[in-house]
Structure formats: structure tokens, C-alpha cells
Image (spheres, rainbow, N blue to C red):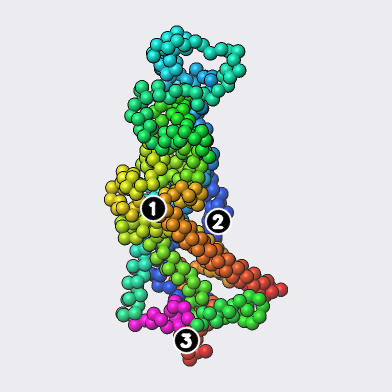
């Protein structure tokens, strides 16, 4: 009798354990984690940031960071006399280039400096400003496009304020990555990028935490690199700066020579370990597969 | 009427410590794989979901390191057992019943490959077959390399003062490749060779119960049986 009830219990358990376990996991996934769907979706959340054009959606504008500013505060008066005392007239609506010129190349971003002085001054000392000077001198646009000014990274009309650090990180990676795609890829393959951007860990470093928000240093000087590392890793020694954050082969020529040599060693050893793993797995998978087939064959032969 | 002869005679194969260590390895290895791959593949939705279930990136990272230390401490316990086995129990760490690979293993592999292709009989194994030795050494050596490369990534400040900085990058490549190897080896080769073979399907219980019927023992480890019972055979 006891054995019988035990058998019943056993068969009952065996029959129901899998569906019950699955249902439990599903309930946990749906109820316990309301944002499970958002987490499981692979595409990042759509960015509401839009680049400025000649036309401004005033609903978006008034909700954004600069929403309380009047047009004239940045653009100056359209007609009459401007601050320098020059006469201004409205552009000719019938002219050929009217509303055709690229806004971001037309606008004088010096007016940003009125309110954002520190950022503006830092920008003027940085790599992007240097690239702008070269662009003006040579007249040549670089491989990735025009040297960026404020408006190429920030949307003066639509950028929202008070974003969380994790959200800032996501947008920043997209923004910087639109001109530096290989650096974006290698950053997202690194612990910092994975933790900060993919997992929303707000103590991990973003692009600007190492390269500077507006100076945008390329960090080729070992001393500069080390001081960037030491902001989060105070115990870092000089060789710590030799750790390669942007660990991929794209844009190899952009790295310093020491980093290029190190990169080659890393890639070579990484390739070797990949080959080692593949060879071992192929051998043992083949071995297991053949052995299993032979054993099944022997078992079936015994049955006949 | 029941007599004792109805019960199959059993052979004691693993002691309590072996069984306990095996369970510790299962638990920690699984958690290490889940947290590690969850963090590595965080670009994918399933990994983000996994990490959020585990309590976020910081918690998953902590769990990963905790399990690593727990698992590695098992090696310490195992080494203590080996010392005890050698010094107190007067066991042999190098003999035919040990896990040290020898000429017989190469011969067994060759004979097994012949058997697989239908030429000849399967090899007669000692206490540990060559595949069981590979299982053991894969874990034993794998844990050393995972441990070292893991420490590189855990304490890059220290290791970059002792070694060149880019060794941390090398360590991270090795750590990932080795992790893939470990999971794909244990998940497929160990599982199929140990648990899914027709003789024991669906599970080999001897590593959990410590015992094995004498009939199976004689069949699967005939050389050890011969060594232990020289008169009877």
C-alpha cells in the first residue's frame, strides 16, 4: 500500500514537475520583472534626440533643456540691429539657397559659450576644435565627416535635461559612435561599455569619463592616459595605462606604436587560444559522437 | 521470503568527500557559467534579463567572484585529501588506480577508436578510464588557468605592475575562450560520455551515491577488479 502511494506520488511528480517548473519560471519572469520585456528586447530604446534643422517642433522644444529660452537669446535678432550694432535684414525668401544651407555648418556656436563657458573653453582646447582648424586650412573634410561643433553632438532644440547617467551613457555611445564606429564597438566589447551601456551600471566609465566631455582628448600621451585611469582606479601604476580598452583591429593605425605592438600580441595569442579550444572541442565532440553511435548500435543489436 | 542474495552486491567507488566536491563543482560551475556569460553577452536581451534576475551587474559580478573563490577552495580541500590519502591511508598517487595519465590511456584511446569503427573489443579500463581522466584534468587544469586569468581581471592594478598592461587583455581573451571550452566540454562531452550512454541513461548515480553494483563494476573497470581480487578471477 505504502509502495503504491509512493509510486503514485512519484509518477504524479514526474508528470507535473516540468510544466510546473516552466510555469513558475514564466510567472516569475512576467510578474517579478515587469520590465522583463524591455530588458529582453535587443534594440536599444529609441532616442528622442533629433538633430536641428531649419524647422523646430515647438512642442518638443519647450519640453527640452533649452525650452525656456527665447529664439533671440541664441540666434540674435532677426531684423533691426544686433548686439554688435550691425543692421540685420530677414533673408530673401526667393533666394536660391533659402532654407537649403546645412544649419549646423551655418550657425555660430560661439553663442553657446555665453552660458556654457567651461564646456566651450574646453572644447576650444580639444581635438575636435583642432580638427576644425585643419579643416578650415586645408578645406578637406575628414573621413568621418565635418569636424564637429556643439550642434553635431548636442541638439540645442531637442536635447532633454536631467537624464540619468545610464541613459546619458547610452545616448553618448550612439553619438560618439556615429563618427567613431570602431571605437563604439570596442567600447561595447569592453567591461566598461558592457556594464555602463548594456547593463546600466552607473559607476562604470563612459566615453567622456576618460576622453573628457568637451576636450575630447585622443589619449595618446601615457601620462594623460594614466591620469584618466586614476580617476576611478587610484592605485593604478604606470603600466596600467597599457591595458587596451579599445581592443580590436579596426583603426589600428590610430593607436600609438606601443599599443599597436601589444595589440598584435593580444590578437595573436587570442587566435592561438581560439584554435586550441576549437581543436579540442572538434576532437572530443567527434569522439563522443562516434562512441555514442557505437554504443547505441551495440544496444540495438542486443535487442534483436 | 527474501534473502540477502537478492540484493546485488555493491562496490564502493567514491567516498563522501569526492561526492561532496562533485556537488560543489556542479553548483559553482553552473553559477559561474550563468553569471559569466550573462555579463559577457550583455549586448543581448536574454543576458540582460539574466543579469537583472541575479540582481544587476554588480551583484552578478560579486556572485561570479564568490563562486570562483568557493570553487577554487575545493582544490585546497582536494589537495588535503590527496595528502591524507598518501600519508595516512598509505595510498598510491601514481599507481594504476590513480588519475595520472599513462601509456595504458594512449593504448586505450587507440583501442577505443578501433572499437568505434567496429574493429576489435572495447578496452578494459582500470579504476579511471581515459575519458574520466580527461574529465578530471580538464577541471583541474582549467581551474588553474581560469583562476589566474580571472585574477588578472579582478586585480588589474596589481597585475599590471608585475606584468605588462596588455596581459590583462590577453587574460580576458583566454578567460572567455576557456569558459566556452569548459561549458561546451562539460555540457556535451562529459554529459554524453558519463550520463547519456545507454548503460546508465539517464543518469550515472555512482558519483552521487558513491556506490555501483558489483556487476557493473566488473564490466566497466575489469582491470581494477582483477587488481583487487587476484585470486577470484
- Mark 2 Cα within 10 Å, few/some/many (few <14, many 20+)? few
Q: Secondary structure at mark 1?
A: loop
Judge whether B46 appears above or below A174 on screen.
below
Dividing the picture into quadrants, the one containing residue B70 is bottom left
Q: Which residue is mark 1?
A: A243
Estimate the spatial distance between the alpha carbons at disc 1 and disc 3, rounded to whole Å.
55 Å
From this viewpoint, is residue B43 visible?
Answer: no
Q: Which residues make up the magenta segment?
A: B90-102
Marks 1,3: beta carbons within 8 A = no
Q: Secondary structure at mark 3?
A: helix
Q: Which residue is mark 3?
A: B227
Q: Which residue is mark 2?
A: A14
Determine if marks 1 and 2 fall on one subunit: yes
Closer mark to the observer between disc 1 and disc 2: 1
Q: Magenta region's main secondary structure?
A: loop
- Mark 1 Cα within 10 Å, few/some/many (few <14, many 20+)? many
- On what subunit does the disc labeled 3 rest? B
Q: Which mark is residue B14?
A: none
Amino acid at each position: 500500500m505504502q509502495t503504491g502511494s509512493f509510486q503514485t506520488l512519484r509518477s504524479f511528480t514526474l508528470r507535473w514537475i516540468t510544466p510546473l517548473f516552466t510555469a513558475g519560471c514564466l510567472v516569475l519572469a512576467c510578474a517579478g520583472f515587469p520590465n522583463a520585456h524591455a530588458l529582453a528586447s535587443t534594440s536599444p530604446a529609441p532616442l528622442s534626440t533629433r538633430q536641428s534643422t531649419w524647422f523646430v517642433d515647438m512642442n518638443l522644444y519647450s519640453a527640452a533643456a533649452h525650452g525656456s529660452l527665447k529664439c533671440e537669446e541664441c540666434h540674435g535678432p532677426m531684423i533691426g540691429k544686433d548686439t554688435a550694432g550691425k543692421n540685420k535684414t530677414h533673408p530673401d525668401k526667393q533666394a536660391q539657397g533659402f532654407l537649403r544651407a546645412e544649419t549646423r555648418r551655418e550657425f555660430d556656436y560661439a553663442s553657446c559659450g555665453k552660458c556654457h563657458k567651461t564646456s566651450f573653453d574646453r572644447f576650444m582646447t580639444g581635438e575636435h576644435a583642432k580638427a576644425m582648424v585643419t579643416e578650415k586650412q586645408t578645406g578637406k573634410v575628414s573621413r568621418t565627416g565635418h569636424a564637429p561643433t556643439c550642434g553635431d553632438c548636442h541638439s540645442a532644440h531637442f536635447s532633454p535635461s536631467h537624464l540619468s547617467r545610464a541613459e546619458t551613457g547610452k545616448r553618448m555611445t550612439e553619438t560618439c559612435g556615429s563618427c567613431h564606429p570602431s571605437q563604439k564597438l570596442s567600447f561595447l566589447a569592453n567591461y566598461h561599455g558592457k556594464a555602463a551601456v548594456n547593463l546600466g551600471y552607473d559607476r562604470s566609465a563612459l566615453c567622456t569619463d576618460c576622453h573628457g566631455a568637451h576636450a575630447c582628448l585622443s589619449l595618446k600621451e601615457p601620462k594623460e592616459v594614466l591620469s584618466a585611469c586614476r580617476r576611478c582606479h587610484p592605485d593604478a601604476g604606470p603600466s596600467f595605462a597599457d591595458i587596451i580598452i579599445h581592443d580590436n583591429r579596426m583603426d589600428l593605425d590610430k593607436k600609438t606604436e606601443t599599443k599597436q605592438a601589444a595589440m598584435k600580441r593580444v590578437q595573436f595569442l587570442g587566435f592561438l587560444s581560439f584554435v586550441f579550444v576549437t581543436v579540442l572541442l572538434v576532437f572530443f565532440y567527434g569522439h563522443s559522437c562516434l562512441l555514442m553511435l557505437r554504443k547505441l548500435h551495440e544496444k540495438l543489436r542486443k535487442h534483436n | 521470503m527474501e534473502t540477502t542474495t537478492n540484493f546485488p552486491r555493491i562496490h564502493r567507488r567514491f567516498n563522501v568527500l569526492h561526492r561532496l566536491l562533485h556537488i560543489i563543482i556542479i553548483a559553482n560551475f553552473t553559477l559561474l557559467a550563468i553569471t559569466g556569460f550573462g555579463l559577457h553577452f550583455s549586448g543581448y536581451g536574454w543576458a540582460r534579463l539574466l543579469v537583472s534576475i541575479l540582481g544587476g551587474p554588480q551583484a552578478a559580478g560579486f556572485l561570479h567572484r564568490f563562486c570562483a573563490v568557493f570553487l577554487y577552495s575545493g582544490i585546497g580541500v582536494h589537495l588535503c585529501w590527496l595528502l591524507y590519502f598518501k600519508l595516512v591511508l598509505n595510498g598510491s598517487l601514481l599507481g594504476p588506480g590513480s588519475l595520472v595519465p599513462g601509456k595504458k590511456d594512449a593504448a586505450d584511446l587507440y583501442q577505443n577508436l578501433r572499437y568505434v569503427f567496429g574493429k576489435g573489443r572495447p578496452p578494459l579500463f582500470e579504476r579511471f578510464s581515459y575519458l574520466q581522466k580527461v574529465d578530471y584534468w580538464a577541471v583541474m587544469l582549467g581551474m588553474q588557468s581560469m583562476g589566474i586569468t580571472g585574477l588578472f581581471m579582478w586585480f588589474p592594478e596589481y597585475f599590471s605592475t608585475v606584468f605588462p598592461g596588455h596581459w590583462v587583455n590577453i587574460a580576458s581573451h583566454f578567460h572567455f575562450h576557456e569558459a566556452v571550452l569548459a561549458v561546451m566540454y562539460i555540457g556535451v562531452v562529459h554529459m554524453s560520455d558519463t550520463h547519456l550512454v545507454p548503460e546508465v541513461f539517464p543518469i550515472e548515480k555512482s558519483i552521487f551515491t558513491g556506490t555501483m553494483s558489483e556487476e557493473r563494476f566488473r564490466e566497466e573497470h575489469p582491470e581494477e577488479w582483477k587488481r583487487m581480487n587476484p585470486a577470484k578471477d
